[in-house]
Image (cartoon, rainbow, N blue to C red):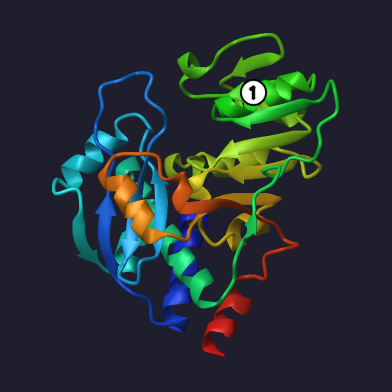
Amino acid sequence: MTLPDEYIELARQVSTSIQIPKVSSIHLPAIVDDVEKPDEFGFVFLQDGSAGPFYTSLNETLQQLWQLYPEGIVIESNVLDLIEQLTDDSPALNAVALGTFNALSQHVMSRAGFLPTEAGNMGLSKPQAGQTIGMVGFFRPLIEKLISQEVNVLVLEKNPDRVDIQDGIKLSTNPADLANCEQILCTASTLINGTLDGLLDVCSQSTSFSLIGPSGSGLPDILLQHGVDSVGGFYVNDQTALLDALQKQESWGHAGKKYQLTPDNYPGISQLLKQIKD
């Protein structure tokens, strides 16, 4: 069973245990013809206001999403119907499916009264000088910090032109090179393009593997079971501020907080569902 299949099964488990709201809207960022534009995200909203982010900057994903949802805003769909598109061949449908799973996850955590732990070091233990940190996807803000600690960074990136090559940075397109890294930071967009399974296969059990980014804002049970040590996400605590920022096409980070979930601070889906029922 693939990771998408397992995500769908987890969503079905939730839907048979508790009543869940429908999707109320999908918000997409505007298409901007700018090669230097930052990574962008859409949001899936449920009828109770729960919001799930998803990455839209993979290749032509955003253009395809606007073709699928030309109105851009209003939709009303069954949550499971959209999540089941995780197994589709279309990255655009995969993206919306993941956003819907994330929205469902935020709904579950909120109803259970579970507030995820605010992110600190994004799953990285303090690296030692000379260590090699694997970076799947190019996280520009982290590069200078890691280089200043005399850490080597191996960047695995499908779009090599995004990477600023400098001393201490090595660029690769071969996932097998990650086997030589002590710690790995991996973009959660790998859940959309279907590459996370393969990345986990090449990493040794002794390697610390952290998934980060807003697209990872879903229930982490499956990832933790597959050896991911830390899952980072984004929790929306001010829906009004988020909607206002999305409508103005502005930064929305102030509408919530980044968080990290690990086996030590996450109680598991069974416990969350129990708390909702109690």
214 sits to left or right of 262: left
Asked if 160 appears above or below 123 in the picture, the reply is: above
Give residue 75's position: percent from left, percent from top.
20, 60
Between 225 and 45, the one lying in front of the other is 45
Q: Residue at x 72, y 19 (%)?
A: 147
- In the rendered structure, the answer to whether residue 63 lies left or right of residue 193 reads left
**Extreme bottom residue here?**
278
Against 3, residue 79 (above or below) is: below
* Residue that label 1 marks: 143
* Quadrant where the image shows the C terminus: bottom right
Where residue 6 appears, x then y in whole percent? 51, 61
- Seen in the image, is 254 located left or right of residue 132? left
Instruction: Kindly identify the residue that appears in the image at 43 percent across and 72 percent down.
Output: 12
Q: Does the image show residue 183?
A: yes
When asked about the image quadrant of residue 11, the answer is bottom left
Is residue 197 depicted above or below 270 in this figure? above
Q: x%, y% of residue 158?
A: 48, 24
The answer to which of 109 and 118 lies nearer the viewer is 118
Which sits in the foreground, 149 or 245?
Answer: 245
Q: Is residue 228 visible?
A: no
- Counting every numbered tag in the picture gives 1
Q: Give, as a three-letter code, the residue at label 1.
A: Ile
Identified at 26% across, 46% down, the residue is 247
Q: Identify the residue at horizontal 64%, vertical 23% (top origin).
A: 143
As drawn, is 269 to the left or to the right of 148? left
Q: In the current view of this chain or complex, which residue is farthest to the left?
A: 71
The image shows residue 134 at horizontal and vertical percentages of 68, 29
- Is label 1 in a helix, a strand or a loop? helix
| Label 1, residues with CA under 10 Å away: few <14, some 14-19, many ≥20 | some
Figure check: 210 above or below 38: below
